[in-house]
Image (spheres, rainbow, N blue to C red):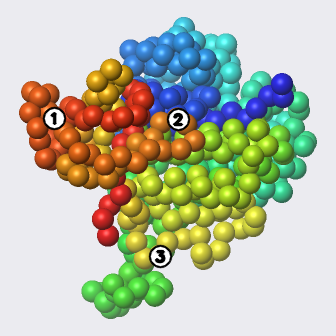
């Protein structure tokens, strides 16, 4: 059987890691407490990392650990011990952008070394350089068109893997090398502490007219989100990338919720599986695009896929998310005899609500709640206590980890 493309999912904590695996990821990427670019994610302690690797390997899932900071000397303290620990627990890959960290990882571990998108790899000669240095995989810069990606893959040594981002947030700066956060807040984006200054609202003030603000663009509220990029979404382009020989599809989002991870990973999993069954087409792509849109999201763009982004790739009016559904709960258990589902509440819902339940299958179920009990067995009309366990009779074979959502009334 021909090797199939890997679906690589973000995992900000164990809950999200388990969601990614349940809903179809072949591999997960995550960070420990140090050396990654998401300092504000929950991230994984050493004990958490050990648990994550064991849980994943039991299910034949690879674990990639991010070490893609651009470090100063003080950031390198303890790195060799940390690398040896990751080697000991059998992490599958390290995601690295800095040559110094790369050299230390090569010297002190037997782990596959992947070159981060932060390294801005945009041509086949650079791919060859990293191949000669011993890298196993290149995560291409996001500033490449499909034609450039295809050409790079065609000129890549056979044993060098190519990974591409196919979904998630885009950065206003080249391959994430942003100075705005550091300049405006003292939080260094290249050391894992980005304040996302690109999402803020901006105006112009002329030096000799203090207090007079001039909008940048057409905004009745007196400002613009001029640097606020739309999010990448290539679910209707995966056939082209698979046929170009791309080895791994990467989903961005270690700061996202378990519901987001489940929704997005499930959609891409189903679309990829449809491709290999010969069933992938525009209708399938649009079906799962609609599913993706049921998670909180920004407007979408294809970014650099066909050409350089233009003014339509930015969202000038707002940095807020689009939400059409609420994540209201996750199934914790299901009794097949009584048909009682135990659901952990995440957002408020009511007796009589129409809800949707989805698992890692192609479709979802629609159910009306006509009974609800709390853990004392008392009938209730509203579930409004965070993480309260609610018991509902549902005539469907549910499984632990199934997600429950509700359409937001307009």
What is the residue that sits farthest to the top in this orientation? 88
In the depicted structure, whether residue 358 falls above or below residue 111: below
Task: Tell which of 235 and 304 is nearer to you.
Answer: 235
Task: Please determine whether, in this image, residue 355 is positioned above or below residue 344.
Answer: below
The answer to which quarter of the image holds residue 99 is top right
Where residue 91 appears, as percent x and y from the top left, is: 57, 17
Which mark sits nearer the N-terminus, 3 or 2? 3
User: Would residue 212 appear left or right of 191 to someone viewing this image?
Assistant: left
Q: Which mark is residue 316?
A: 3
Which type of secondary structure does the marked residue at label 1 adopt?
loop
Q: Foreground: 263 or 163?
A: 263
Q: Position of residue 59 (x, y in %)?
A: 56, 17
Question: Horizontally, is 306 left or right of 48 in the view?
Answer: right
Mark before the other along the chain sequence, 1 or 2: 2
Residue 398 image-quadrant placement: top left
Give the residue at mark 2.
Answer: 360
Which label was assigned to residue 373?
Answer: 1
Secondary structure under tag 2 reads loop
Residue 166 screen position, x and y as percent: 64, 49
- Secondary structure, mark 3, is loop
Give the mark toward the camera: 3 or 1. 1
Q: CA distance from mark 1 to mark 2?
A: 27 Å
Q: Is residue 7 left or right of residue 156?
A: left
Quadrant location, the N terminus:
top right
Q: Earlier in the sequence, mark 3 or mark 1?
A: 3
């Amino acid at each position: 059987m021909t090797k199939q493309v890997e679906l690589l999912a973000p995992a900000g904590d164990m809950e999200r890691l388990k969601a990614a695996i349940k809903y179809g990821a072949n591999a997960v990427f995550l960070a420990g407490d140090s050396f990654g670019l998401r300092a504000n994610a929950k991230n994984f302690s050493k004990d958490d990392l050990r648990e994550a690797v064991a849980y994943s390997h039991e299910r034949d899932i690879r674990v990639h650990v991010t070490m893609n900071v651009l470090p100063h000397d003080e950031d390198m303290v303890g790195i060799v011990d940390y690398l040896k620990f990751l080697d000991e627990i059998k992490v599958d890959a390290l995601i690295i952008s800095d040559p110094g960290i790369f050299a230390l990882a090569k010297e002190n571990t037997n782990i596959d070394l992947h070159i981060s998108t932060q390294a801005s790899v945009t041509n086949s000669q650079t791919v060859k350089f990293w191949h000669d240095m011993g890298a196993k995989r290149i995560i291409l810069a996001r500033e490449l068109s499909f034609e450039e990606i295809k050409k790079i893959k065609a000129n890549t040594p056979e044993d060098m893997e190519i990974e591409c981002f196919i979904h998630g947030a885009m950065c206003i700066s080249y391959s994430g090398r942003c100075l705005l956060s550091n300049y405006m807040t003292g939080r260094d984006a290249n050391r894992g502490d980005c304040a996302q200054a690109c999402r803020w609202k901006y105006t112009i003030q002329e030096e000799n007219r203090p207090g007079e603000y001039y909008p940048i663009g057409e905004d009745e509220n007196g400002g613009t989100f001029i640097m606020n990029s739309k999010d990448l979404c290539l679910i209707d382009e995966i056939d082209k990338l698979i046929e170009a020989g791309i080895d791994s599809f990467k989903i961005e989002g270690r700061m996202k919720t378990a519901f987001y991870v489940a929704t997005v990973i499930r959609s891409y999993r189903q679309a990829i599986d449809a491709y290999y069954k010969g069933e992938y087409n525009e209708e399938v792509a649009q079906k799962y695009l609609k599913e993706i849109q049921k998670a909180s999201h920004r407007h979408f763009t294809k970014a650099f896929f066909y050409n350089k982004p233009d003014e339509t790739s930015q969202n000038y009016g707002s940095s807020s998310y689009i939400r059409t559904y609420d994540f209201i709960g996750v199934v914790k258990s299901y009794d097949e005899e009584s048909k009682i589902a135990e659901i952990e509440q995440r957002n408020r819902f009511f007796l009589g609500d129409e809800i949707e339940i989805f698992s890692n299958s192609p479709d979802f179920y629609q159910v009306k709640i006509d009974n609800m009990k709390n853990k004392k067995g008392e009938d209730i009309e509203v579930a409004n206590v965070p993480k309260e366990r609610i018991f509902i009779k549902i005539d469907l074979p549910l499984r632990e980890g199934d997600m429950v959502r509700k359409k937001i009334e307009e």
